[in-house]
Structures are given as structure tokens and as C-alpha cells.
Amino acid sequence: MRILVVEDDALLGDAIQAGLRQSGYAVDWMKDGVSAEQALTTEPYAAVVLDLGLPRLSGLEVLHRLRSRNSQTNSQTPVLILTAMDTVDDRIKGLDTGADDYMVKPFDMGELAARLRALVRRASGKTAPLLQVSGVKLDPAAHCVLYQDKSVELSAKEFALLHALMLNSGKVLSRARLEEQLYAWGDEVESNTVEVHIHHLRRKLFPELIETIRGVGYLMPRDKAI
């Protein structure tokens, strides 16, 4: 999953980026509101971690503009606000502007990752923390995959790709959309990288789990009979 982190504090931003990458996320980090606004208009993100006290454009204004675009496209990018302003009015203002959750600085990285998992899961219409499709079980928190109750070893990118497909089971995802979810800015992406990961997943799990829709992308059916 690809996450946008918007934080102007260099030490904190670097720590968040490193911690989320360790949790398996692809992370873009912006240090001001204008850069965040530009990123949000050009890239699809699974979620946003947004500081309120930003230079050039406030976090609340970034959030307001994002929600205005979301209402036009009938989509809803989950937003978790980070704030050092621990007052009820500040929290109310952020939530009323369209935030889905908030955390007060300082915070625990493990809790931040857990809250993001919950936001991404709910945005995809999932309620249970464990994803299950056709005998495959994926636990985002434990970062493990079981097939027919046996552990399956996956690389970080294979896990991220499987996670994206399972969150969107029943929907066709294009190769470009999958690449956008797997790689942050600056990551090297080879031309056939998604196809290679798909091949490995089919080999490690079972071939019929992921269908190729020619000229469109890839589909993981919701209830595929094995």
C-alpha cells in the first residue's frame, strides 16, 4: 500500500517514513502543504498521514481541498491527522473537515501502523482484520500469509501486491494502478515487475487465484472455487 506522509519536522518525518516502510508500506514524504496538495492531485494513495501545522499551506486546507475533490470523484482517501495541538476544538475541527482519525504527538509507531491498517481496511469495505479469499488468508498486522492453513513465504513486494488484490477482490486492477500502490517516488520500477510478482504468487499459491484480464489488468475473484 502507498501512503503519503505530510510532516515538516525532519526528524519525525524521517522516523515515520522509516517505520512505515518497515511495516511494508511504500511511502512518499512531503514537508509542506503545497507539495502535499500537488502529490494528492497526481497520485492515488491508500491513506494520508497529515500534520496540521505545515508551512505554505495548512494541513486543514490540504484536507479541505482533498475532500472537495473526493466529493467530485465519489472516492474517499482515508486521512489520519497528526497534531501537537491537544485541545478538543482542534480535534473537532480536524474531524469536521473530513479526517478519519487523529493522533496527538508524541505517539507510538506501532499504533500509527495499526490505525492505518484499520483505515485502509475500512476504506476497502472490509471489516475483519484478516483477509480471506479462496483458501488464502492474509494478516496485515502479522505480515503473514497462509494457504490451506500452511504458511507461505512471500517477498515484501509479493505480500504488498497480494494485499492490494485481496483488498480489491472482485475488481480489476490495471498494471499501472498496482505499480502506483507498490512503489513510492524514487523507487526503481522495471517494465515487467508486476507480471513477475503475479507469476510468483500463482506459483506459490495456485494459478487460478489471480486472473489476467487481457488489455485491462488483473482480477482476484471474491469466491473463486479452487
Image (spheres, rainbow, N blue to C red):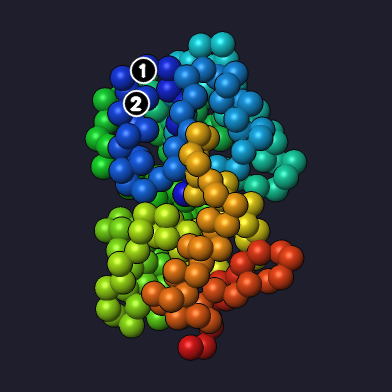
Q: Position of residue 95 (x, y in %)?
A: 50, 33
Question: Residue at position x 56%, y 11% from top?
Answer: 56
Q: Say which amino acid is labelled 2.
A: Asp
Left or right: where does residue 75 sit relative to residue 124? right
Give the camera-side residue of 176 and 88: 176
To which residue does mark 2 refer? 14
Question: Is the residue 164 above or below the residue 212 in the image?
Answer: above
Q: Are marks 1 and 2 in contact (CB under 8 Å)?
A: yes
Q: Secondary structure at mark 2?
A: helix
Question: Residue at position x 51%, y 63% from top?
Answer: 196
Question: Residue at position x 30%, y 37% from top?
Answer: 19
Question: Residue at position x 47%, y 75% from top?
Answer: 202
Q: Position of residue 142 (x, y in %)?
A: 27, 58
Question: Is the residue 54 above or below the residue 152 in the image?
Answer: above
The quarter of the displayed image where residue 138 is located: bottom left
Q: Say which amino acid is labelled 1.
A: Ala
Q: Secondary structure at mark 1?
A: helix
To which residue does mark 1 refer? 10
Alpha-carbon neighbours of circle 2 within 10 Å: few (<14), some, or many (≥20)?
A: some
Left or right: where does residue 181 sit relative to residue 16? right
